[in-house]
Structures are given as structure tokens and as C-alpha cells.
Image: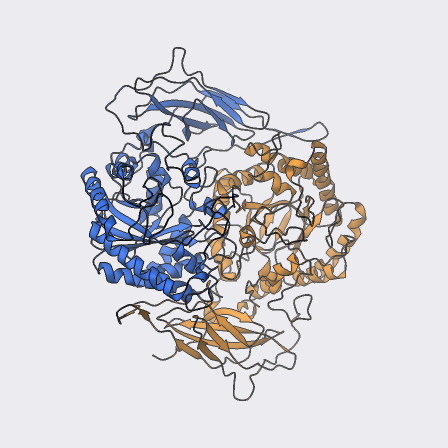
Chain colours: A orange, B blue
Amino acid sequence: MGVPACRESFKQNLLMTKLLFTPLTINRMTLANRILVTAMVTRLSGEDGFVNQDIVDRYVRFARGEAGLIVVEATAVHQSKSGPLLRMSSDEFIPSHRALLKQMRDAGPSKVALQIIHFLKIARSGWRQTADMLSLDDIQFIIEAYGDAAARVRDAGYDAVELHMAHAYTLSSFLSARNKRLDEYGGRSLEARLRLPSEVLVRVRQKVGPDYPIGIRFDAEECIKGGYGLSESKYMALRFAQLGADYVSLSAGGKFEDAIKKEGEPLYPYTGYSGDRTMPPASYQYAANVYLAEGVKTFINAHGYPTPVVTTGKINTPGMAEEILAAGKADVVGFARALLADPDWPKKARLGREDAIIRCIYGNVCKNLDENFKQVRCGSLWPRQYLHAPEAPDDHEPPVWPAGGAQLSAKLNENGQVRLTWRAAMDPQGVYGYEIFRAVNEGPFVHLTSSMTASHVEEYALAGNRYAYYVRAYDFAGNRSPDSNIAEITLDPRFSVPEGKTLELDGRVEAEQGFSA
Amino acid sequence: MGVPACRESFKQNLLMTKLLFTPLTINRMTLANRILVTAMVTRLSGEDGFVNQDIVDRYVRFARGEAGLIVVEATAVHQSKSGPLLRMSSDEFIPSHRALLKQMRDAGPSKVALQIIHFLKIARSGWRQTADMLSLDDIQFIIEAYGDAAARVRDAGYDAVELHMAHAYTLSSFLSARNKRLDEYGGRSLEARLRLPSEVLVRVRQKVGPDYPIGIRFDAEECIKGGYGLSESKYMALRFAQLGADYVSLSAGGKFEDAIKKEGEPLYPYTGYSGDRTMPPASYQYAANVYLAEGVKTFINAHGYPTPVVTTGKINTPGMAEEILAAGKADVVGFARALLADPDWPKKARLGREDAIIRCIYGNVCKNLDENFKQVRCGSLWPRQYLHAPEAPDDHEPPVWPAGGAQLSAKLNENGQVRLTWRAAMDPQGVYGYEIFRAVNEGPFVHLTSSMTASHVEEYALAGNRYAYYVRAYDFAGNRSPDSNIAEITLDPRFSVPEGKTLELDGRVEAEQGFSA
């Protein structure tokens, strides 16, 4: 058995991305492509709630990447003491947003929305305010606060406003099947659960006018015990469409109900299974929540509403996004971690340079930073000192291996892991990371994962198969080193069977995109 | 606006069920249809672990219903003190199973499998044994116990043996991504997690011979924080197929990790979200786990394995089952609650009498009984005194309404609920229950849910729509009363908008099968 002859050819992998780059008009706003940067908490703003230079730098970096729509992070509609969080709770915040937008528009063609949020109180003791603790006056306040903040969003010059109704926050807590109120805003009927979100949407529409795009982001499934699923969320989407929402952006999970309590810390809503569904980890399937978008889109389209549906959740390559659009499962594809890792993803896809994308490995270091109240960055792939994604310098010199080559080796541990090690590459402007490619049996090489260090532990090699690996280094300009040597390992196909016999597996597995460590 | 002209016509609803009634050969066993009764705990056996009369009655009742394959409940491979649970841990248990099988075969044409299980220890304190506490000797014991029990299953005359590798039990705990062992049976690699289940399967095959059908039931997704999903379970299915499993039956969730602790009671593994995914409740979407079966089947078929895939999870009508088969998402459709509610479901479907099926409403009273260590029955639909599904008596006299009719009324509560009430029907042999039908706007009437009492609270009526309802009573023979009067209610389409304005919803929702309370 020789090693596979062909290494990964990016030419072959260049899938057509015609649909992904088809413009889309949402109310008066036209997106150049179907790529949306979903709102991501950054913890970059000051405690004062104003846009600061770090915020500007983060979003200008996205703007240079050419996503169709960039949704700037959740911004509070109310005065609140809640750490580094943008606010739009009074007019004084508007000028800093105007300045942000000016710089984003100078940097690239992306449309820009602001996500606005109201959240309930949480305490370090573990106590948290729930929907049933709010008075009718509190509810009226929330409606007006959303309306006023939305008007400010428009005044500031954003192209659209997105209303946050997902995860653990106020409006999601009303939509929730675990809303415990008994009144007309309560959990006893779907209509009552929809009332506050509906009234907020109506008020926002009044404030921003008919020609201003409003998006709604909400959970297509709560992913908690007794929570709602698709059979209710499709009616929620229909309601929002009926009330004139211009797009619906679907998330999943992210709830307090299954969050894991850390002593002395307020609950963080992405620590339970529902949080895994919001930001599926490396081991979880790609495009994990697309079936929810498909269910919602099919339903509202069948009811005569063409309202665009945005799907999100571990979608990482242009080919995967195109496939989702081609299958009619969504109208827009949202990315958080993948575009945090490489804000230039859209531009590279447009130019047919998918090969140069720095691929998210879903290590969720970004999520852990948020959980620990630290500034959010890509801790899996960015160099340690970078607060934002590195810019590609004007550098055409690729990394090189030391004399004697990469010396990649693959060794099997007793516990079934394959340990890959290699020698560090060198680059005058610095090595950014290593891409690891794998071929199974006679299959082609495909990208398995990436690493910032010169080693990787592979947990998914299976008995009876032959695995071949190579690695290559890349620098900040996206230049790739020569491929390393190929390291090969064949895993014993025999199974221990009593009485001295052995049993051989008679089949093989194929490598595929969508299964990586 | 008049009321809809046509009531539900079952003639129109009679979908072709050609695929559902296409025989399937699994190893040497040929099923008459693609309907499988999944293993359901009954708590009917004695503490001694022998088949008793209640067990016989329960399974003979299923056998009369003509399901292609009936999987008799999880039966321990080991001696254990664990309440009313069947055991196959020594030869002394074989005769009682032979007697059960004889009676089942006299009653109907179903093939019969026995599911065998090993489970770890749990205590009222909340302590539970986990995979990492087992020694290599313990592991060897488990392998041998499965092998020996499987040989007894064959000796007893069962048509097949099913190995329980799902939910909270031993083999599932080894497969789990949360397996904490560090050794060759441990959680550090997929291969190591697969080792014990693989060795059990190999040992069982040795013991039962090549011509005996072996099925594997396991989770396609764990549905817990840090658990595995489809990207790993498809490889598990492939491994089982490679090792000669004759079918794979896919479940989801049912784990201890997210179970809710009740003081003084041992953990019950279906109390968290993962339990909702094993037995999706009324509010959750139908056929909720079929996408997992589709992913597994696509993957193993592409690898050259035609091993039949069984899907389960809130699939309730012949039409829905046929649709799943027609779309190629599974080869066999498994039912638990739907066939507990009406064991005659397969026979009625075969005869084109879908209209006579007593339809499961997914109230999960059966699950609650199990959770509380009570004998498991359908507490939502069966009359109180019945331990098993009522037999249809030779009775052709339908229930009737009292003089003056049913007087069905529909009233809107302030919290958005529509409360339906009607007068009780009468029947000489007893009224079994009421079916509730609903039409939305100009749509057709479809079955919404069923009730044992003369009232129902509808939580899903939405503003801007007109709902019409009728009910009818049914008796134990399946005779239906005349339809009641139609009660109609129109929900205000206006939304509260400040400044004295109103906003009307401009769209309607349609009724559909697959959304019921």
C-alpha cells in the first residue's frame, strides 16, 4: 500500500459560490453577498458604554473583509451596570457610533446593523431576575426603551437594527416555554409569550419608520428541558414576519436554565448543553442548526412570507455555505467564530482564494474568554499578542522548514490517540500557524484542523484504516510553506476475541470534510 | 365568514403505506413490515426477574397488533437488585421466556427480539458508578455476561437479540464523549470509547453464530454538554456495521449527566433536556430525531453498508412513517409511546383503518410512571383501571351525545388560552375518550389532540386567526360518535400600539398535522 498520490488541490476544492455572492435586498438595504457577521460580544468597550478605539479596530477589521452585513454586538437599550458593554440608552451615545460607522464605511462595502438588547439582572449569588418578576410598568419601560434605542440606531446612521430576542435575555425569556407569568404576557399560551416581543417590534417599527430594516434574532430551539422547539419557533417567525420584520436570524440555546453555576460568579448562559448548541464545539457536527432554519423557512414561505432567514452555527467554508443556500434551507448564512478567526473570509471567498482562509477550529477559546470576563479574541489561532485578527502584510516570502525538513511523525498511543509532531517552521515575519491535512486509506487529503504549535493529537483515527498526514506552515500574509513529509500510520484491524481468535474489520472509512478534531 | 364546509375525511387522509408494509429481511429474520416496537421499560415483572403474567399480557397485546418486530424490554445480563426488571443472567430464566414467546407467536405474526442490558450502580444518595470506576476484570465480566445472555436469548427462541448501548447505561457510558477513563477503554479517543461496545458485539456474535440477527440500539446524539453528536455517532454506526451488526436502532439522550436530582431518590436519566430528546413531549416537533437517522444512514450506505437503520422519537401516524421511508431517511420506523397507546396501530394501518387508531398525545404520563417506579401504562388515554391497552370488544354501537347535543363551546381566557368544554357522551360499553379536531381560517379540520375528559385547553391559538373546533367521542371498539357542533372563535388581530393607533396582522396561519397541544 503506497501513500496517496495527490495532495489537497485547492483548485479542485474551489466550489462555485454563485449564490453566496448574489445580492439581497432587505427593505431599503442591499447586501452585496449572503454573508452575515452575527453579533458577538467582544468585552472591548469601556464600562461607560461608549464606542472606544478597540471597538472601532475590531469592526473596521471586519469591514475590510467585505461581509454583506456586519451586525455590531449587543448594545443595551437601558442604563445598566454590567461591565464593558455598549449602550444606546440615551442620545449621548450616538456620536461615537457615527464615528464608528464612518470608519467602517471607509474600510469596505459592508452594510452595518446594530443589535439592541435588554437583559434582566443577575447576581454573583446565583440569583437572577426572571420574566415573572416584572411589573406591567417594567414591561412598558422595555417597550419604550427598545423603541427609543432603535430610533437612535437609525439616527446614528446604521443600515439596520437587529432586536435581540435570543438566548438568556429578556425578550427570549418571554418567548420561552418556561416563562412562568400567568397574565397576558405569560407562559400559559403561545400568544401571551409572543406579546411582549410583538409589542416591541411594533413600537420599533413606529419609531424607525416603514423603510428601515429591522431584523429579529431569536432561538429556533431553546435546547433546554421543557423549552420550545421548532413546532413553536416556526410560529414565532411567522408572527415576526406578519408584523413586518425584515429578516429573522436563528440561533439556538444559550440559556440560563442549564448553565453551570460557578461559586461566586454570576451565571454564564453558554456553559450547559444549550450553550454547546449556540456555539457547537469542535467535536459537534458542522452546520448543526441548519435543520431548524430549514423548518422555519419552509413554514413561513408556505404562508406567503419571503422574509429572509439567516442560519448560523458552525458553518465554516464557502462550499458549505453555498450548499445550504442551494438547498433552499436559508437565505443568508451567518458566521461568528469563523469570521472572528478570519475577517477576510468573505473577500477571500469572492476572489476564489478559499485556500488562504484561516480556518476556525472551533476550540471555543473565544467563548471561554467571554465566560471569564476577558476581552474576546481568537485564542486558538491568533498570535498571543494580537487583540484583533492580524492584517496580511505585503509579504511574499513563505515560511520554510529547517534544514532536514519538517520531520513529521505520527505515533499511536495506547489509548488510541495518534500523536503528530513536527519541527517548527521559520518565517522572517513570523509563522502564524500550521494546517494539518489527512488522507484516509485511498481517499484524498483534506484539511483536518489547524494548530498554532508544532504538534497535534488526533482522537478520531479508527482501527482497520490507514491514515496519512502532512502539515504546512502559514504566515500572516497567507503564504504557505512547502508541504511537509507525509507521515503514515496503519491501525491494527484486529479485534480482541476470546479463545485466541482474532476478527478483522472488513471495511474502511473515508475522510471527509466536516469531521475534524 | 362561514365555518369550513368539510370536516375531516379519513378517506382523504388514507395515505399510501406501501413502503411501511414492504417486508424486510434482517439476517435470517424477515419482518412483515417496517414497524418496530422499541424496548420500553414496563416495571411489570417481579423483583425475581422472571417473566410473569403481566409481562405476558403486555407483550401478547403487542403481538396481536402485528408490528414487524417487537423488542421486549431491557433485560439484565447480570444479577442485580434493581426492582422489577427482567433478567437473563442465568439459564433458569430461559423457560419463562419460552412460554412468553409461545403465547406471542400464537397471538400474531410479529418477530420478537429481546433487548439485553448491563447497567452501573446508582444510589439514593445521588452517587453513581461511572465507567472509569470499572477494573479490566469488570470489563471482561461485562463482555462475557453479554455473550452468555445473548446465547440464552437464542436458546429461548427469540428471533433476534438487541444490545442496549443507549442512554444512561454501561455501554453508552463507554461510548460517551464524557467517558473519563484514560486507558484503552477510555475517553481520550473514539477508538478507545468504541472498544468495549465492539468487543461485546464480537463476543455476542461468537456466541449466537453468524445466522442470528443482532441489533444495536445506541444514541445518535447524547444531547448533553460535551456529549457526542452525529459527527461521531455515524462512525459508531459504521463500526457496528463493520463488525456485523444486523441493524442499528438510533435513540437520543436519556443521560444521567443532566438528570434532575430528587432528594432521597436515585437519579432518573430522562428528567433533563436529554430525556426530552429521548421521548419528545407534546410541545416538541414530531419526528424530532429523524435527521440523525438520515445522517447515519447516508454515511454508512455511502461506505457500502446497507445495514438497516431504525429511527425513533415522536413519530405518530402511518403517513409520517411512510414519508420518512420514502425520503430514504431510515429503513425501519420504531415506535414506543404511539404503540403503547394503541398496540393495534400496525394492523389498523395495514387495513387502511388509520381513522381507528387511538392517537398518542405525548403527555408522557407513561414516562412519569416509570420515573416514579410505578407500572408503566398509558395514563393519558387508557381508562384508569386498565393495566394494558383495552381490547376492542365486538360492539358496533357508537357513543351518543346527550339530548341537546354536545354543546361544545370555545372561550378565550385573558392569558391567551382557548378553553374548550363539552358535555360528556354516553356509550353502553363506556366512552374511551374524545378526539378534538381543529380548522384554522379556511383550512381543513385536522386532529389536534385527544382527551379522556370533556374539556381541553388550547395554548396555540394565535391572534388574527379564526379557529373552529369539533369533538367526537370514541368507545373501546373504536366506534365514533357523531361529530359535535362546531365551536368557533376569532382572535383579535389588533396589536396594542401606543398613541391610540392599532396595527392589524395581515396574515393567517394554517392548521397542519404536526402541531398539537
Q: Position of residue B385 (x, y in %)?
A: 35, 27
Q: Report the front residue among B430 and B355.
A: B430
Q: State how many labels appear.
A: 0
Q: In this view, does B214 lie above or below B333?
A: below
Q: Report the front residue among B40 and B427.
A: B40
Q: Report the front residue among A34 and B142.
A: B142
Can residue A418 be seen here? yes
Can residue B302 be seen here? no
Quarter location, residue A503: bottom left
Q: Report the front residue among A308 and B189.
A: B189
Q: In which quarter of the image is the N terminus of chain A?
A: bottom left
The residue positioned 43% from the left and 70% from the top of the image is A416
Q: Position of residue B225 (x, y in %)?
A: 52, 54
Quarter location, residue A497: bottom left
Q: Position of residue B50 (x, y in %)?
A: 28, 44
Task: Answer with left or right where residue B442 lies relative to residue B22.
Answer: right
Quarter location, residue B51: top left
Point out the residue furthest to the bottom here.
Answer: A403
Point out the residue furthest to the right here.
Answer: A92
Q: Is residue B290 above or below residue B393?
A: below
The residue positioned 65% from the left and 67% from the top of the image is A389
Q: Position of residue A409 (x, y in %)?
A: 47, 80
